[in-house]
């Protein structure tokens, strides 16, 4: 199944509350069950600061997970 997960924040990339914990834990658990999961979050400065300067998009990694930033 293809699943789109939309959230205002996702741990470990951006976090201010408990929603980020759920948004960070649920997609990998669904992927482990064989689902194709896409996570969509706003382009927070904390996430964008981790990308390659001067290039559109990039990748950020934390806790064994990598996310593409577009």
Image (cartoon, rainbow, N blue to C red):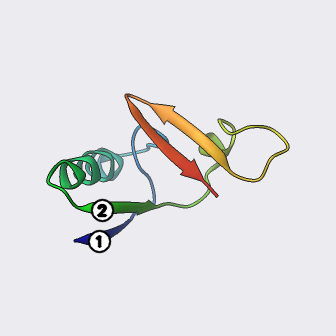
| Quadrant hosting residue 2 | bottom left
Which numbered disc covers residue 2? 1
The residue carrying pointer 1 sits among few (fewer than 14), some (14 to 19) or many (20 or more) residues within 10 Å by Cα, namely: few
Instruction: Identify the secondary structure beneath mark 1.
Output: strand
Q: Residue furthest front?
A: 34
User: Dots 2 and 1: beta carbons under 8 Å?
Assistant: yes
> Which quarter of the rendering shows the C terminus?
bottom right
Q: Residue furthest left?
A: 33
Q: Calculate the distance from the C-alpha at mark 2 to the C-alpha at mark 1.
A: 5 Å
Percent position (x, y) of residue 20?
A: 36, 48
Which residue is painted at 39% across and 62% down in the image? 38
**In this rendering, would 17 be left or right of 9?**
left
Q: Which residue is mark 2?
A: 36
Which residue is painted at 14% across and 53% down in the image? 33
Percent position (x, y) of residue 9?
A: 44, 53
| Quadrant hosting residue 46 | top right
> Which quarter of the rendering shows the N terminus?
bottom left
Q: Earlier in the sequence, mark 2 or mark 1?
A: 1
Q: Residue furthest right?
A: 54
């Amino acid at each position: 199944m293809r699943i789109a997960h939309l959230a205002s924040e996702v741990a470990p990339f951006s976090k201010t509350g408990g929603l980020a914990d759920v948004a960070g834990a649920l997609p990998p658990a669904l992927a482990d069950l064989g689902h194709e999961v896409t996570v969509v979050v706003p382009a927070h400065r904390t996430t964008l600061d981790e990308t390659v300067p001067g290039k559109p998009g990039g990748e950020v990694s934390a806790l064994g997970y990598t996310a593409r930033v577009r």
